[in-house]
Amino acid sequence: ENEVNKLLLKKDKINALVTSLYNPPIGTKSIEIKDRNANIVEKVLVSVTDAEITGLIDSLDSESLDTLMKYIYRFMSKSSNCSLMLKLHAALVEKAGVGSIVRVLTDRKQV
Amino acid sequence: MANALKSYLDCVNKTLDAALCLRNFPSQNVERHNKPEVEIKGGNKELLLNPVIIARTENERVFIESSVNSVRVSIKIKQQDELESILCHKFTRFLMQRSEQFVIMRRKAVEGYDISFLITHAHLEKLWKHKLIDFIIQFLDEIDKEISAMKIAVNARARVVASEFMKQFSA
């Protein structure tokens, strides 16, 4: 978490996103850990501007893309920053294809 | 504004595309029965996929629940004031009473939403999947316009009626 804050301060958004998406709490049943992780990811995503979205998405690897997709749907269900989520969703689908949505729907281990 | 609507509809489009992969699956619990698994209360967890919500704002969202042989799509329509909620309620009631004509519509909306569609594998065998998705997107697009048009019509009529009524007191 501290690493993400440091990276954000340095305005290095790509690495901030990569760090926050790394090792998501899929296995744990504890709600608090999942919430805290979600808050961190959300902080990073909110600071991203429209123009940076494509660059950001291009730099992520496939596992992180899937994790990001899961987070997008999680944030949409809470109705936070919906327009940003929709833009991210469109860019992600362009990169990763419909398969990433299918993986969100079918994966038992939710973020 | 139009751009946000378009990205919302695109998102719904792609998600429906992913969720509408259905196949025939006879009921596991009852012999010789074939039920839409998404409709069964307390149904088998292994047959259900993760439900997903796509929200444009707090008041406008689409809830998609899918399973191996059926998908339930519930829509919450934007209602900004009392008049719009009454109009929306009456309009959706009108549609839902004629849900047989729509084939895929559900007679009762899921709780918390205004209208629901239930799509089963049988429907997908008869209808084209991309056309079905286009229909739902078109529905989402036009229902907002319909409700605004109805609201304007109601206000216009009310104004005319009120002015006619007041004339008898003025002249």
Image (cartoon, coloured by chain):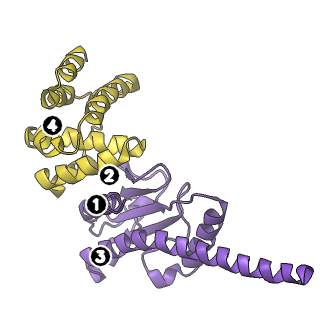
Mark whose residue sits in front, 3 or 4: 4
Q: Amino acid at mark 1?
A: Ala
The numbered dot on residue B49 is 2
Most extreme residue toward the top, as rendered? A2
Would you name the residue on which mark 4 appears? A64
**Tags 3 and 2 in contact by the CB under 8 Å rule?**
no
The numbered dot on residue B124 is 3
Mark whose residue sits in front, 1 or 4: 4
User: How many angstroms separate mark 3 from mark 1 (CA)?
Assistant: 12 Å
Residue B95: percent from left, percent from top? 54, 77
Residue B32 is at least partly visible in this image: no
The residue sitting at 17% across, 27% down in the picture is: A22
Task: Give the mark, 3 or 2, whose residue is nearer the N terminus.
Answer: 2
Number of residues whose C-alpha sits closer than 10 Å to that of mark 3, classed few (under 14), some (14–19) or many (20 or more) = some
Would you name the residue on which mark 1 appears? B19
Please give the chain letter of the residue carrying mark 4.
Answer: A
Asked which secondary structure carries label 4, the reply is helix
Mark whose residue sits in front, 4 or 2: 4
User: How many angstroms separate mark 3 from mark 4 (CA)?
Assistant: 33 Å
**Tags 2 and 1 in contact by the CB under 8 Å rule?**
yes
Please give the chain letter of the residue carrying mark 3.
Answer: B
